[in-house]
Structures are given as structure tokens and as C-alpha cells.
């Protein structure tokens, strides 16, 4: 089953009617490999309507199909979830999102549990960067501002 088919099936399973505009919506969000905002989809798939776009996104986040990323500056961004367990690298300039997973980090977090006797039930890691494309285009980020993105 393709990603497109599996997303459409998830929508159907949850009682969403599969209309032409909803299929367009799915096609549009798959295309955005580096993430998108809800308003971008509203603009791209005008026939779907704002309420439908937001409702569909919310369901896909609940179903684990989309990751929702809170951004310090502006609206949250969404990406189609690839790997089961992963973290995000986000460009503070253009907002592009990539996934990563590092065994070393996972192991370090696991050992925290052993040390403190706490039961770790989950974690979230977001790494903020100035991506290669933005750097090549001459973008600069004030280091103090970048630091703030962490907290
Ligand atoms: Zn993700
Ligand atoms: Zn960038
Ligand atoms: Zn992890």
C-alpha cells in the first residue's frame, strides 16, 4: 500500500467521506516533504475549505500520520511521519523539517531511566538549525535568538 492509499484508508476508517477535494488535500500534504502549515494547504486546495483542512489535519495528527511541530515564530508546521520513532531538525529561517534518529541519543536517554529510577514514558527532541540552503542564500541567525528557540 502506498503512503497515499494508507492515509486515505485512515480517513475512511475514521468516518471521513472521501471526496475529490479530500484526495487533493492528501496529495498536497504528501508533496510537502519538508513540512507545511495549515494555511498553506488552505491556499493550495481552495475547494476543500478551511474547516475541512483543519479537521483533516487534526485527525491525521491523532492517528500518527502527521507530526505537529510548535514553532516559536508563527503557526505550527506539520510533516508526514516517516520512521516510527524519530525526532526533528527544523530550520529556524525557512521552517523546513527533517527527521532524524540517533541510537546514541536513544541509549543516553534510556540510561537516565536506570540512573534515577524514574520510568521514562517518552521524549521529544527538536534540533534547530540554519539549513544548508538558507546558509547558501546568505541567511543569518542571531545566535541569541537561536538559543531562545530551545526554551
Ligand atoms: Zn515527524
Ligand atoms: Zn532553511
Ligand atoms: Zn528518541
Image: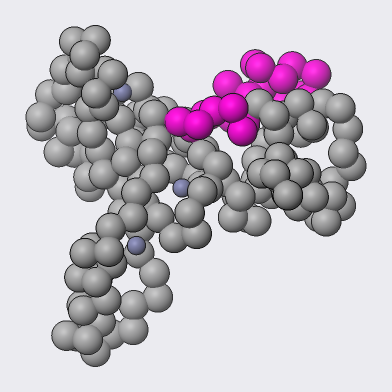
Q: Is residue 8 left or right of residue 42?
A: right
Report which quarter residue 51 is drawn in: top right
Magenta part, dominant SS? helix
Q: Residue furthest top?
A: 137
Report which quarter residue 101 is drawn in: bottom left
Whether residue 110 is visible: yes
Q: Give the magenta part as a residue range.
A: 29-51
Going 54% across and 28% down the picture, which residue do you hit?
A: 32
Q: Compare residues 95 and 52 and report the one nearer the observer.
A: 95
Q: Position of residue 81 (x, y in %)?
A: 53, 48
Going 10% across and 32% down the picture, which residue do you hit?
A: 144
Q: Position of residue 68 (x, y in %)?
A: 50, 45
Whether residue 39 is visible: no
Q: Residue furthest bottom?
A: 117
Q: Position of residue 49 (x, y in %)?
A: 77, 24
Q: Position of residue 80 (x, y in %)?
A: 55, 42
Q: Residue furthest front?
A: 1
Q: Compare residues 56 and 72 and report the one nearer the observer.
A: 56
Q: Quadrant of ligand 2?
A: top left
Report which quarter residue 47 is drawn in: top right
Q: Is residue 96 above or below residue 79?
A: above
Going 52% across and 38% down the picture, which residue do you hit?
A: 78
Q: Residue furthest left?
A: 143
Q: Is residue 143 left or right of residue 91?
A: left
Q: Is residue 83 magenta?
A: no
Labels in figure, total: 0
Name the colouring of the figure.
Answer: one colour
Q: Is residue 45 above or below residue 32?
A: above
Amino acid at each position: 500500500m502506498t503512503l497515499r492509499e494508507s492515509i486515505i484508508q485512515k480517513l475512511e476508517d475514521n468516518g471521513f467521506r472521501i471526496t475529490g477535494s479530500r484526495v487533493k488535500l492528501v496529495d498536497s500534504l504528501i508533496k510537502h516533504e519538508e513540512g507545511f502549515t495549515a494555511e498553506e494547504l488552505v491556499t493550495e486546495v481552495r475547494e476543500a475549505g478551511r474547516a475541512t483542512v483543519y479537521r483533516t489535519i487534526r485527525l491525521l495528527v491523532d492517528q500518527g500520520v502527521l507530526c505537529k511541530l510548535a514553532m516559536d515564530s508563527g503557526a505550527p508546521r506539520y510533516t508526514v511521519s516517516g520512521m516510527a520513532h524519530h525526532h526533528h531538525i527544523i530550520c529556524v529561517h525557512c521552517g523546513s523539517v527533517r527527521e532524524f534518529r540517533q541510537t546514541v541519543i536513544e541509549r543516553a536517554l534510556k540510561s537516565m531511566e536506570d540512573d534515577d529510577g524514574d520510568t521514562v514514558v517518552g521524549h521529544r527532541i527538536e534540533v534547530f538549525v540554519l539549513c544548508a540552503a538558507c546558509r547558501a542564500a546568505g541567511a543569518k541567525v542571531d545566535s541569541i535568538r537561536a538559543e531562545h528557540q530551545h526554551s
